[in-house]
Amino acid sequence: MNKKALQVVTLILALVPTLTGIVGLMGLDDPIYGQHSGNGNEILDSNLRFFSGLWLGIGITLFFIIKRIDAPLQSQVFRMVWGCIFLGGVGRLLSMFFAGPPPLPFVGFTLLEILGAPFFIYWQKKIAAK
C-alpha cells in the first residue's frame, strides 16, 4: 500500500465519474440511457442531468487531489468523496430491493461503491498517516 499506487488507482477511477458525468449531461438520449428514453420523462431527464453534473464534479475533484493525496485537506476531501460514493451505493441497493436488479455492470458498480469506498478510505488513511 504505497502512495504512488493509490494515486494511480485514483487517477483511473476518477475517469469513471468524469466520463460518465459528461455522457449523462446528454440526458436520457445519451448512449447509456437512450434505449430507455421516451416522452414524459422530463423529471428523469432533469434529474439525470443534475446528478451527472454532480458526478462530473466528483471526478474533477478527484483529479485535483491526486498530486497531494496524503495532505490534510486532500485527505478530508478524498474521504468525503468516497463517503458520497458509498451513499450512492446505498441508493443503488435500495433500488435493487424496491425496483429490481439493474443490468450486470451496475451491480458491479454497486459492489465498488459499497465495498470499495471503505477500502479506499482505509488505504488513504494509512498513506496519510505516514
Image (tube, rainbow, N blue to C red):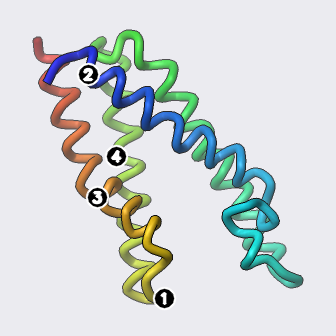
Looking at the rendered image, the quarter that the N terminus falls into is: top left
Q: Give the image location of residue 106, x and y in percent.
A: 46, 66
> In the depicted view, which residue is nearer to us: 79 or 27?
27
Disc nearer the start of the sequence (1/3): 1
Q: Which amino acid lies under the numbered mark 2 shown in the image of this protein?
A: Ala
Distance from disc 1 to disc 3, alpha carbons, whole Å, reads 19 Å
Q: Which residue is mark 4?
A: 83
Distance from disc 2 to disc 3, alpha carbons, whole Å, reads 21 Å
Residue at 33 percent across and 27 percent down: it is 76
Q: Are marks 3 and 4 in contact (CB under 8 Å)?
A: no
Q: Which residue is mark 1?
A: 99
Mark 3 or 4, closer to the camera: 3
Q: Are marks 4 and 2 in contact (CB under 8 Å)?
A: no
Above/below status of 3 relative to 106: above
SS at badge 4: helix
Disc nearer the start of the sequence (3/4): 4
Disc nearer the start of the sequence (4/2): 2
Q: Which residue is mark 2?
A: 5
Q: Which mark is residue 114?
A: 3
Distance from disc 4 to disc 1, alpha carbons, whole Å, reads 24 Å
Badge 3 crowding class, 10 Å Cα cut-off, few under 14, some 14 to 19, many 20 or more, is: many
Distance from disc 4 to disc 2, alpha carbons, whole Å, reads 20 Å
Disc nearer the start of the sequence (4/1): 4
Image quadrant assignment for residue 57: top right
Image quadrant assignment for residue 107: bottom left
Q: Which amino acid lies under the numbered mark 1 shown in the image of this protein?
A: Ala
Q: In the image, is 99 to the left or to the right of 19?
A: left
Looking at the rendered image, the quarter that the C terminus falls into is: top left
